[in-house]
Amino acid sequence: MIAYIVRRLLLVALVACGVTTLLFALSRLAGDPAALLVPPDASDEVVAATRDRLGLNEPVLVQYAHALWGSFTLDFGDSFAFGVPAAQMVFERIGASLWLVVPSILIAVLLSFAIGVVAALRPGRPSGRLIMAATFVMGSVPYFWLALLLVMLFAVRLGWLPATGGTGYASLVVPVVALTVTAVSTSARMTRGQLLDSFAEGYVLTARSKGVPPWRVLLGHALPGAMPPMLAWLGIEFSFLFSALLILEPLLGYNGLGALLIRGVTNQDFPLVQASVFCMAMLITLVNIGLDVIVRAVDPRLRTKVAT
């Protein structure tokens, strides 16, 4: 297991290099950063001085080495638009985004587990089909459209919640509900499918034939077998919900990392974009690696495969 963890941590370094390389290439393809910083009527001398200050006159390989070093030391330079370290701005906003994603994941896990179990215990029955149909309907509703409907109902019509922005827990309600509904719709189907596969396994059929009570078959046999794929699926859900913030936060005026990244792209603020994308990619990678380690810890079959 320790060797597996070390290999996965080495993968983090490779991902960091890959993300930095991609961002470096895109920033150079987007145009001359110096020309974006100076006024449109600036003289050539001013543009040249700005290029020299940003290190753009150095060879490309040297610039790339500086970008790599900056990523590993979390020094992305100052934001073009705000004049403060870009990493500092990202660290100040990433907590606000986690206040949306983490509660959404936790609530979705509880709801999808309950819905998935009920649907798996009633395969082919009208109640089971009704539950699955409801999850399909929930999944077909775009999260940003649902958020707008919630704003119109609870903020505009009823006045219970802030329409946009705001502080405190009230500002979390609409985005968390929108993200949770999206996550529940897919996770519930995932839970149902994995439980049905576990019910067909030989050890579960043997337990049933021996007269083991249904609740013990579910909790003691079927659920442990279905848990590893469900845990791995959480990593995908976390990635999706975090990427959804790129639309949801600007839409709702929420000051999180997604809104900050969109602002950086709009202003062509390369340090801010690089810091936001890099930190977001590393967070998603670390969460997925952590879930991979947990999956290996709870599933002895995968530990055997890794050992061999």
Image (spheres, rainbow, N blue to C red):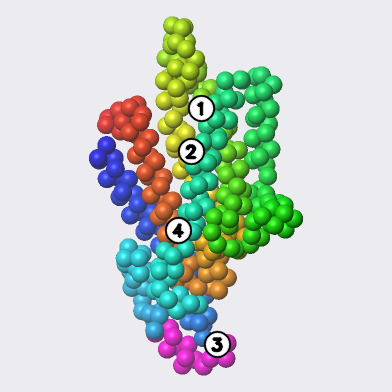
- The residue wearing badge 3 is 39
- The residue wearing badge 1 is 194
- The residue wearing badge 2 is 233
For disc 2, the neighbor class at 10 Å (few under 14, some 14 to 19, many from 20) is some
Q: CA distance from mark 1 to mark 2?
A: 11 Å
Q: Nearer the viewer, residue 163 or 298?
A: 163
* Amino acid residing under circle 4: Gly
Which is nearer the N-term, disc 4 or disc 1? 4
- Predominant secondary structure, magenta span: helix
Is label 2 in a helix, a strand or a loop?
helix
Which mark, by number, is residue 290?
none
Q: CA distance from mark 4 to mark 3?
A: 35 Å
Q: Which residue shows up at 37% across the image and 57% down it?
A: 16
Q: Are marks 4 and 1 in contact (CB under 8 Å)?
A: no
Q: Are marks 1 and 3 in contact (CB under 8 Å)?
A: no
Residue 307 position in % (x across, y down): 27, 31
Which mark, by number, is residue 95?
4
Q: Quadrant of the image for the C terminus? A: top left
* Amino acid residing under circle 2: Trp
For disc 1, the neighbor class at 10 Å (few under 14, some 14 to 19, many from 20) is many
Q: Can residue 258 be seen by looking at this rendering?
A: no
Which is nearer the N-term, disc 4 or disc 3? 3
Is label 3 in a helix, a strand or a loop?
loop
Residue 217 position in % (x across, y down): 46, 17
Q: Quadrant of the image for the N terminus? A: top left
Which is nearer the N-term, disc 2 or disc 4? 4
Q: Which residue shows up at 40% across the image and 69% down it?
A: 88
Is label 1 in a helix, a strand or a loop?
helix
Q: Nearer the viewer, mark 4 or mark 1?
A: 4
The stretch of residues the image draws in magenta is 40-52
Above or below residue 264? Residue 177 is above
